[in-house]
Image (spheres, rainbow, N blue to C red):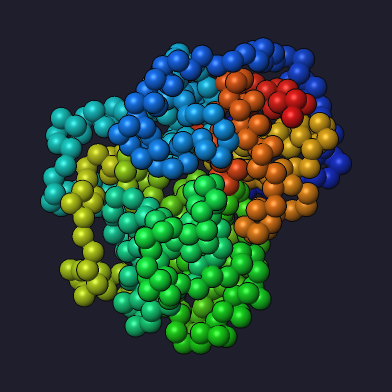
Amino acid sequence: MQTFSQSFVIGTPVCTHTQRTRRVRHRAQRINATVATEPRTQLKTTQSEKIFKEAQTMLPGGVNSPVRAFKSVGGQPIIFDSVKGSKCYDVDGNEYIDYVGSWGPAIVGHANDEVNAALKAQVDKGTSFGAPCELENKLARVVIDRVPCLEMVRFVNSGTEACLSVLRLMRAFTGRNKLLKFSGCYHGHADSFLVQAGSGVATLGLPDSPGVPAASTAATLTAQYNNLDSVRDVFAANKGEIAGVILEPVVGNSGYIAPTKEFLQGIQDIAREDGALLCFDEVMTGFRIAKGCAQEYFGITPDLTTLGKVIGGGLPVGAYGGRADIMKMVAPSGPMYQAGTLSGNPLAMTAGLKTLEILDRPGAYEHLEKVTGRLIEGILQAGRDAGHAVTGGHISGMYGFFFVDGEVSNFEDAAKQDTAKFGRWHRGMLERGIYLAPSAYEAGFTSLAHTEEDIDKTIAAAREVMQSL
């Protein structure tokens, strides 16, 4: 069993004051003296190129999710062969330190031995029942115990499914139709959400998605993240008509953008006064930034929450839940219909249970804070030392940065970043064995498997690449 340091407080944002800067420079000097990155060489990608060329004849764009195609960073995607711990390995035999983590689920490390053992034992008992099983109760009990707003929960199969279901639930419970979301926040690809949706849409430069009828988005309203005045204006213009507000409590789909607590509290106050519901989309932040998710971290309890990623331990999963009086609207308890063939399947429940058990061990979140803080501090200092305008931050195991002057508080700020420079940065890091999200509009993730050596190597590579841009 891995032992984690307990000396760091969860959620320390990146500081820019003199003391922290001197400490980072001292670390950088130590890293440069002790860690040598491999000389930059052209990656051997023969097999990746062959497989991706074939994929393009069968899969749209050669991938099953757009951001994987590397279109915004140049080059072509590497094709994974296997993963373990903090590392990923491609079909050409290259090894990388991974800061994507399957886009968040791999918080205890890839192919964790304990998670794998639990899954192998469950496979012998069955992979899908299509009927109730006790594992659903067990995972529900753990999730309800940890997440402040949850009194009841419904498991589904993806974050998209969770978000489209919670939208229907908010409308059913309030008898209203309109939804307020925030520019740059992504809540899956359901029609109603594909309005100023950030993430993959921003990565590909698409304003919205063709094929979405105007009627599907007519009831979707948008406001600016971290801007309470814009929220007040929307509510004032639609008084008594908004069913609910949904947002990422920490944005990860416009890059990493943290809220102010005043912003989150203000949204809750405005929504309550108008009779609207508040939903935190914690598909990304859930169990990653704190044991009780972002709502525990910020001390703001919403009416509803969507979850995914971590609660499936690397298997397809999603969930939505909240106050019991609202959740009792869901069939078969109530009239709002939602169903799923593989919902609550025993493999996802098993992997989720073991993952949350590991996260509950002493020192887990302290470890995430420690390695992530060192990582982002080192990257930012490397950029500044090389003369680049950079800004960024982290909370626990979630981080990000931008090539831009000034702070980034919303998608509009993020859109000012130098995405061309980010593309060169991404390629330079890839050449040095560091696998990062292939988009300037995505957050990064660490895991319990990331070591001090991983961070040292990454910072050393970052210094080389920043100097070369």
Residue at image x 43%, y 21%?
A: 48
Residue 24 shows in the view:
no
Q: Which one is nearer the viewer's eye here, 64 or 56?
A: 56
Q: Which one is nearer the viewer's eye here, 139 or 304?
A: 304
395 left or right of 462? left
336 left or right of 15? left
Q: Tell me the quarter of the image containing the C terminus.
A: top right
367 left or right of 145? right
Residue at image x 38%, y 82%?
A: 176
Which residue is situated farthest in the front direction here?
Answer: 57
Vertical relation: 445 (above or below) 223: above
Residue at image x 56%, y 63%?
A: 183
Examine the image and state in which quarter residue 58 appears.
top left
Residue 343 location in percent, x, y?
A: 23, 51
Residue 348 location in percent, x, y?
A: 28, 42
Residue 163 location in percent, x, y?
A: 38, 60
